[in-house]
Each structure stands twice: as C-alpha cells, then as structure tokens.
Image (spheres, rainbow, N blue to C red):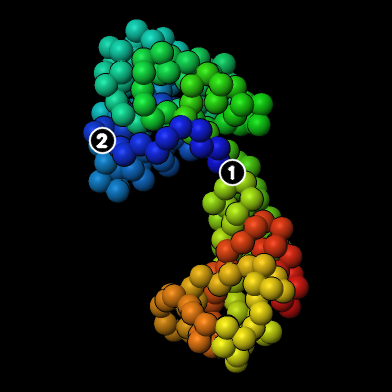
Amino acid sequence: MFRGLGPEIEHRGEIVVIGLGRFGSSLSRTLVDMGHEVMGVDLDSANVQAHAGVLTHVAEADTTNEQVLRQLGVAEATTVAVCIGADIEASVLTAVALSDLGVPNIWAKAMTEPHGRILSRVGAHNVVFPEAEMGQRVAHLITGGVLEYVALDEDFVLAEMTAPASLVGVPLGESNLRRDHRVTIVCHKPDSGRFTHTDRDTVLSPQDLIVIAGRRKDVDSFGPSRR
C-alpha cells in the first residue's frame, strides 16, 4: 500500500533513515547493501549502537527538533525516510521539521490511514503502509495458489503462480485471457528454466510459473478460478 504525492526525485548523496526499529533497520541495511551511504538516526541509544559500523553514520537525536536536524546536516539531504513506529506524534513532528527544512524527497511510514493522511498534509511526499501491505501479501500466500503478491498501487497488482490448467498447451494469443479475466501474463518461468517474457505464441507447460498483472479484484478472482 503506497501513496505517492510528490514528483519523482532522482536521489543523490547520503540517505537519512530516521527510526531504526525493525522497518527502519531493514530499510537502512538494504540500502547499504545496494551501495548507498546511509545515516541512521534514532532516539534510542541501543538502536543507534546496534547500527554503528553497519551504516555510514549513526546519531542519537530527537528528530522532532528542526535545529537538531540542521546540526546533523539533514537539511542538505535529498532523501529522508521517516520510519518511526508507534510514536505517531514524533513521526508527524519529524515530517513537519523535514518539510520546513525543505528536504525535497521525504518518505514516511504510516501505521494507519489517518496517520498517512496527516503525514501527507504536513509535507511527506511519499507515504508507505508496510504493515497493511504485508498483511495483504500474506493473506494471498497462506490461502494457497499464489507464490508471490506485490501491490504496485492501491488497485494494480502482480501475482506469481503456477500456470493454470486452462492455459496449458495453447498459445496465449488464443487463450482469451484478457477478455475472460482482464489480466495479462507478463512473463513466465519454464520448469528448471529462468523467467522470460511472454508473447502471443508462448505455450505454457503444467509446471511453468507465471506472473500476472491486473486490477486487484481481477487478479484475486483469477487465482481461485484457475483451479
């Protein structure tokens, strides 16, 4: 679940991650693995110490204070991610401070829809709902049939699954998939092969994996109906 409000920004320089709990820790460590320089900031000294030597820079600080952020050099950052968890007040006040500093690319984690709307209104350019997104993903995984489920926005998703029997052995161009189910197969993975693009002449085998794309309700209905 994601709400993008601002223009797309090409990131430059060090990324600042505020809040080094589970989500912020995972985000910051992944960014480092991708080759980015990351400053991690948290009010909890234990969280800061746990990331010393892992992130490029770490700091223990109250990020609701604009002057503190300025002293840390956050005002010069292009991208800042606010990953503060349960303390909604601190999350919102941090977003306000970052907006007042003129940070051009503010991402913020929201716990609820109202929290997300407030973050958007006070200056966050992009708001993510990781708990809601994970709940939706797991719901599809545990009910069987779907191997992976990714929401690209509120109403468009990708799902990975085994090729249904109704599509096996016939060229996709003759399957009437779009007409009957309003979804598209964007790629497939033959048994013991690698993912590759599909076209009208692609013929699927029973063990092939496919990735389908479409509106949420169409993808959801296609999964159960294929059995």
Which residue does the image show at 51% across and 70% down from the upper left?
Answer: 186
Foreground pick, 91 / 210: 210
Type of amino acid under label 2:
Arg
Type of amino acid under label 1:
Met
Q: Which of marks 2 and 1 is nearer the N terminus?
A: 1
Give the labeled residue for mark 1: 1
Asked if residue 126 is positioned above or below residue 167 in the image, the reply reads above
Disc 2 and disc 1 in contact, CB within 8 angstroms: no
Q: Is mark 1 on a helix, strand or loop?
A: loop
Q: Residues within 10 Å of mark 2 (few under 14, many from 20)?
A: few
Left or right of 112, for residue 48: left
Which residue does the image show at 74% across and 70% down from the upper left?
Answer: 224
Which residue does the image show at 56% across and 61% down from the upper left?
Answer: 158
Decide if residue 31 is in sight here: yes
Give the quadrant of residue 210: bottom right
Residue 12: which disc?
Answer: 2
Foreground pick, 197 / 225: 197
Asked if residue 92 is positioned above or below residue 204 in the image, the reply reads above
Give the quadrant of residue 143: bottom right
**How many numbered markers are drawn?**
2
Q: How crowded is mark 1: few (under 14 residues within 10 Å), some or many (20 or more)?
A: some
